Image: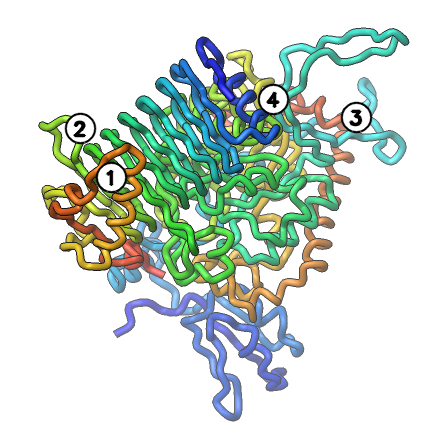
Amino acid sequence: MNFSYPEFLVKVSENCIKCRRCIKECSFGVFSWDGEKIKINHEKCVACHRCAACCPASAITILKYPVSFKENHLWTEEILRDIKKQADTGGKILTGCGNDKPYPVLWDKMLIDACQVTNPSIDPLREPMELRTYLGKKPEKLEFWHDKSGEIKLTTVMEPQIKLETPVIFAGMSYGAVSLNVHLILARAAKELGTIMNTGEGGLPQELLPYKDHIVVQIASGRFGVNLEYLNSCAAIEIKIGQGAKPGIGGHLPGEKVTEEISRTRMIPAGTDAISPAPHHDIYSIEDLRQLIYAIKEATRYRKPVGVKIAAVHNVAAIASGVVRAGADIITIDGFRGGTGASPKVIRDHAGLPIEIALARVDEQLRKEGIRHLASIVASGGIRSSADVLKAIALGADAVAIGTAALIALGCHLCQKCYTGLCAWGITTQKPELTRRLNVEEGALRVTNLVKAWNLEIKEILGALGINSIESLRGNRERLRGIDLDEVYLDVLGIKPAGR
Amino acid sequence: MKIDARGMHYRELNERIHDAVLKGIKEIDIVNVLGQRYIGTGIGEKVTINVYGTPGSDLGAFMDGPVINVFGSCQDVIGNTMNNGKIVVHKDAGNVVGLSMRGGKIFIKGSVGYRTGIHIKAYKDQCPVIVIGGKAGDFLGEYMAGGILVVLGIFGREKDPIVGRFIATGMHGGTIYIRGSINKSHVAHDVSIEEIDENDLSALKNIIQEFCDAFGITDPNSILSHQFLKLRPKSHRPYGQMYAY
């Protein structure tokens, strides 16, 4: 007996021209040919829409399976399905992408101000708008001297900075979780846009070396692919402590995904599990974190900023303060809606904090302690639009990182099956017949387009706010108002209610 | 070349070492070392660094080639994520020796603290080797993915067990050799405990010979003639069965 019904119903209409392209396109094995017509195995459908998008006759429709579970607000369909799956397998339920549960999305409860009459707005078509952003430790004050010719020169020695032409950077996604083509696309787009991409913890594929000035390399608990060449082939180095989609836990890239190529960049034998322990075993305290930050600074002779990425958790403000005091030049806070290639669902859906809350608390705490200038803040985890970027910067972020949004630009339909390695869009897979579905040039153009469009919108909003530089918006919560939020939320976010 | 490190901040000391290496100096003696961190960290050249005194943590982190001789004891995390080279410690070392190292050798004459050889891994012709002449603390070889870990138990405090508790948890590659007996209840259940065979013995012979040479021990056979146990993972996929797809 089968305890579970299919999740989706795939229909092929009479418009079908029997070209059988759907059979080729579906990597999950839904379609087959019985000699006369297309046969369908509904159970295998994950609703990634690859078949429907590719069908030349527009003959394919995907619906929710019509056997509806008896409505029950406690025992929802998702809960029933999960219980049955666990009774079948005895395993932890895996999932991909970010938390999809109906927690409040606070971005949608914040409104941006605009100028009228008393404070004139600026027309971004006519006047320069500055989106340039520098990530890195800033000095407490600047000192100058006049040289013989009377020219003003900077006396203060600046710490290394990353120069960005947009406050949008790409989030860490490892080669292994995503395909090499995705890495190449993000690297190319980063170079074109004047921003950075992040290798995640899977090492640096050799093909990315030409883009090294636009790459942040990650050091995570597995230390995969970390050697001197890695540390010196980048714009900055990031110590990954945690990730929003799975705060507090490690990760396993299963052996079957460790192909020859993956094995080369991770520097482990092909076919073995790549295990990232939950903590770094040389970091059990803030003091230990400082030790690793400075080990990296020593190894790179203080020429590159060192960042630390943490997941947004309940005590994030105090942790962030410790991270900054430990010497991090950049701190990335990843909210619980951040994506993942694979995470136990129970962690993804129930642990952590929304980035909006974490960001507001961290910025406030660092300011209160007078150490906000010591590190740049990058906010990530569910940034969907230029409005989210603007609101994040007004809440205190220096820049935001996007992962899921960039992948959606490449074709991702959020079917959440990244962990199967079967991604029909060629994004989270290593199968050559699937990865070649992503054209590097076209993909780079699409991602570049997305960020360029956001840049235009950001400039538009800055103009409406009467601000000509993104820096002037940073931490400027006076330009945000909360709507439909209670006093506690307003207090935590540090914003006034709409109408005040 | 000789550097007197008395009262010197680690940053200055390491700048001087880096500068010397850049100038092509092949052997550096550092005297009066007291707690300076990161000695030899990030050096990719084949140089010899002789450390007299007690260096601080992260000695030889990320290093790729040097030989570091420490005439004294070390603090924590020596050889962190090291790729190649050799670290020889003439007394004891602290916690987390050789974390995630991928190649090279670490020889410690005395004992070590907790978490030795965590997550060391082998790759192609690289096979990291750690030999402890004395005793090792808890969590030896946790998450070990490759390489060779040897604990001899010759030196160190007599009352201490040769290895502490929680041995080889999550081990999925490589080999641990222990000279003497261990409490089996302290070994992870997915790790097998075996007698050594001829192949093991010939591998051990080379390693022990090099260890003895490093410390002027004249009779390697007296070490080898003792009973050795071999710990190996039963599976290269210890966590393969935990998920529902």
Q: Are marks 3 and 2 in contact (CB under 8 Å)?
A: no
Q: Are marks 1 and 3 in contact (CB under 8 Å)?
A: no
To which residue does mark 2 refer? B156
Numbered disc in front, either 4 or 2: 2
To which residue does mark 4 refer? A137
Query: What amino acid is labelled 2 in the image?
Result: Gly
Q: Earlier in the sequence, mark 3 or mark 4?
A: 4
Do marks 4 and 2 share a subunit?
A: no
Query: As rendered, which of A370 and A277 lies closer to the eye?
Result: A277
Query: As rendered, which of A386 and A183 lies closer to the eye?
Result: A183
Quarter of the figure with the C terminus of chain A: top right
Q: Chain of mark 1?
A: B
**Residue lying furthest front:** B218
Query: What amino acid is labelled 1 in the image?
Result: Leu
Q: How far across and down, in percent of the image, does residue A44 sit? A: 43, 71
SS label for mark 3? loop
Numbered disc in front, either 4 or 1: 1
Quarter of the figure with the N terminus of chain A: bottom left
To which residue does mark 1 refer? B140
Where A79 falls versus A154 (above or below)?
A: below
Q: Which mark is residue A468?
A: 3
